[in-house]
Image (tube, helix red, strand yellow):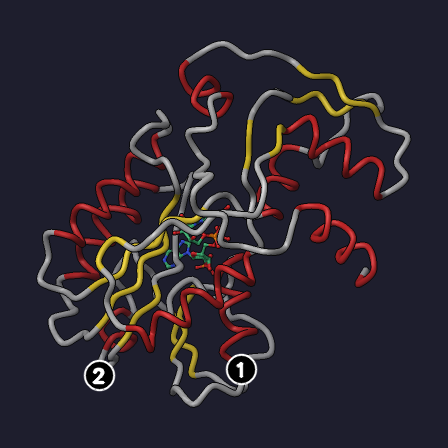
Amino acid sequence: MTGATGQLGKALLNKLKGSDNKVRITSRRKPEGIEDFKWIYSDLLSGEGIDEAVKDAEVIIHAATSPVKNSRSIEVSGFEMLLSKLHHIKHFIYPSIVGIEEIPLNYYKLKFEAEELLKNSSIPYSIVRATQFHGFVEHLLMSNPLLKRYVIPGSMKFQSVDVGEFANHLIDLIDSGPQGRADDFGGPEIMTLREMTELKIKINNETNKVLSMPLPGKLFKSFFDGKNTNFTQKSGRITFEEYLRNKKVTK
Ligand SMILES: NC(=O)c1ccc[n+]([C@@H]2O[C@H](COP(=O)([O-])OP(=O)(O)OC[C@H]3O[C@@H](n4cnc5c(N)ncnc54)[C@H](OP(=O)(O)O)[C@@H]3O)[C@@H](O)[C@H]2O)c1
């Protein structure tokens, strides 16, 4: 499993603890609490550690990613280099994102290119596109109130999903075997960012208010139109509200 220190990587580690599988994990930073696993330093930019990480592996869950820094080198060139070393692999599981070909975001274009590289390789694969994780939406879009106001593009839509449920789904695929392009994995409900932010304010008893700003451009329009959602695939059960309440209890 690559990307052991990321949001998805950490969730996968939690679920894989005590698993019958022998699990080898990679990242550049060393994760905490990894007694059940063999950790290997590996860098998709320099290639360091990759040979050792993939040697004799049967299944790979590829949770490493770099949306901002060196993104082309990691999502596409590093990915291609990784694939070139996987002739022995029985199943490569690639988490992707719902709507990537319809949303004009550079990172999404690169994810789409990576999907194509995998499809055109001879490696047995499953590509599973998920909607945004609950924590991702919360941290990216509602973490910094300005003068007691969350200034947000409130009409953006999200169908956010619990990262732990997505991790379980990817682990189940180990036994199911390669699916090709699998069904999308979406959260249980579609909400506007305004609704999600108001929920956060209510649950945390905040005094902050919401100031919604319409934003121009194709990128925001695609989120206003919900191109990042798939209402036919409401696979996750844990709602954004439950995620926020659970976080409050476990704090
Ligand atoms: N976030 C979402 O809402 C969301 C939704 C749907 C699908 N996904 C997909 O799920 C996957 C995981 O996303 P995430 O949000 O968990 O990502 P993340 O939190 O940003 O984690 C990225 C991981 O990649 C590793 N990494 C970064 N640069 C690297 C490099 N040069 N070499 C090797 N490893 C490197 C990081 O570890 P080190 O820095 O320690 O190396 C980290 O473990 C991605 O494919 C993403 O597209 C995400």
| Snapshot quadrant of residue 178 | bottom left
Please tell me whether residue 146 is drawn above or below residue 52 in the rendered image.
Answer: above
Q: Nearer the viewer, residue 122 or 35?
A: 122
Image-based side of 126 in relation to 217, left or right: left
Give coordinates of residue 78: x percent, y percent.
24, 53
Residue 180 image point, x, y percent: 21, 58
The residue mark sitting in front, 2 or 1, is: 1
- What whole-number distance in Å separates the C-alpha atoms at marks 2 and 1? 21 Å
Assign a secondary structure to mark 1.
Answer: loop
Quadrant of the image occupied by residue 137: top right
Q: How would you rate the neighbour count of disc 2 (Cα within 10 Å): few for under 14, some for 14-19, many for 20 or more?
A: few
In the image, 21: left or right of 150? Answer: left
81 w.r.t. 101: above or below: below
Does the closest atom of ligand 1 sit within 8 Å of the Cβ of label 1? no
Question: Given the image, on which type of amino acid does mark 2 rest?
Answer: Asp
Q: Amino acid at mark 1?
A: Lys
Using the image, determine if residue 231 lies above or below residue 114. above
x, y (%) of residue 55? 22, 80
> Which image quadrant: the N terminus?
bottom left
Quadrant where the C terminus sits is bottom right
**Residue on which disc 2 sits:** 56
Instruction: Specify whether 14 is left or right of 127.
Output: right
For image coordinates 36% across by 35% down, the residue present is: 99
Q: Residue at x 25, y 53 (%)?
A: 181
Dot 2: what SS?
A: loop
What residue did someone put label 1 on? 17
Q: Is mark 2 within 8 Å of ligand 1?
A: no
Up the image or down, 70 lies above or below 48; here it is above
